[in-house]
Amino acid sequence: MEIANRHVLVTGASRGIGKAFAKMCAEDKAHLHLVLRKTDPEAVKSLEVAGAKSVTVWEADLSTRQGVEDLLQRLKDTPIDILFNNAGTLTGGLLEEQPLDDIYRMFQVNLNALVHLTHGLLPGMLSRKRGKIINNSSVSAYMHFPCASTYAASKAAVAAFTDCIRMELKDTGVTTLLLITPGIKTRMFDEIETLYSKNFQIPNDSISPSKYAEMIREAILHDLDVMEPSGLTGVGLKVAKFIKPLFEIEVARRFKRS
Ligand SMILES: NC(=O)c1ccc[n+]([C@@H]2O[C@H](COP(=O)([O-])OP(=O)(O)OC[C@H]3O[C@@H](n4cnc5c(N)ncnc54)[C@H](OP(=O)(O)O)[C@@H]3O)[C@@H](O)[C@H]2O)c1
């Protein structure tokens, strides 16, 4: 799908991957719809300068069902072509040490809001016979580490959800793109160290958000269904998927309970 002149909605556009993706879409002359918890006039200005056809901010907190419902209500006459479900939060550490409120909030933002927004915007895409739903999952969906239990569960669910609707949407004009995202140098990437490192030695290779946005751009233009990492992380992902016992030997070497 082309990006130019398309209406692109990005959740989590305030920073990290979402912000870099919005900038890339602006340079490609899209109409941008930013979902932010708080309006940011400077960000809007810089996207207009970068070339966006238009920039609209939709204030929303995705951590409650009501927040998503209100957003969809306000969006109802907006013909979104590309929905980038990107907003996310991280939980981590030994399960019994993860605060339950954080776990509930994380599932709401990472999974429930993503399903809810897709559910709300899909009918319009189907009636226009045009749309793309991009869901930001993670290598954690397949590479299962100790300390990542709840976050990995949310991302595995995102991967399963996307795969199911990919098949449902065949020949409708609406397509999906599943991102199996590796380490990207954002605030969340730095939080991994804080939350995991007491018990688990995490690999620390990463790429920049702008480089990743470029890769997503190529995947959109070529209508890929799934984008997986290459390099060392790509090898790790394949080992985790297809030679699990070998993957677990390496995981065990990096983990200590206390
Ligand atoms: N970075 C990585 O290594 C990595 C790896 C795999 C997958 N991912 C996934 O990539 C996505 C983007 O992550 P990132 O690395 O760019 O992280 P980030 O820099 O921490 O950005 C997270 C974004 O989500 C938004 N967000 C969080 N809670 C929200 C809420 N309740 N309502 C609305 N927006 C909310 C944040 O908005 P505020 O500014 O308002 O907080 C921010 O824009 C996430 O889904 C993440 O799980 C990242």
Image (spheres, rainbow, N blue to C red):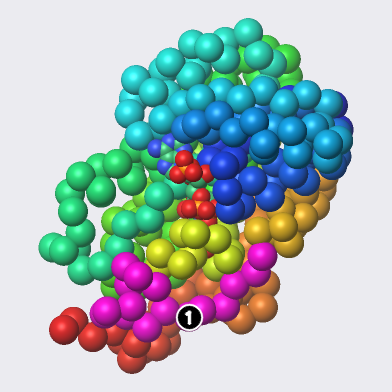
> Where 48 sits versus 160, above or below?
above
Residue 115: x %, y % from top left: 44, 32
Is residue 156 within the magenta segment? no
Q: Which residue is mark 1?
A: 203
Foreground: 179 or 212? 212
What residue occupies the far left of the structure in this picture? 96
What is the magenta range?
Answer: 193-208
Which corner quadrant of the image does residue 200 belong to?
bottom left
Compared across the picture, whether 49 is left or right of 211 comes to right
Residue positioned 67% across, 36% down in the render = 42
- On the question of residue 162 being in view, the answer is no
Residue 49: x %, y % from top left: 83, 36
- On the question of residue 71 being in view, the answer is yes
Amino acid marked by disc 1: Pro
> Where 67 sits versus 233, above or below?
above
> Where 41 sits versus 160, above or below?
above
Foreground: 136 or 223? 136
Residue 2: x %, y % from top left: 84, 36
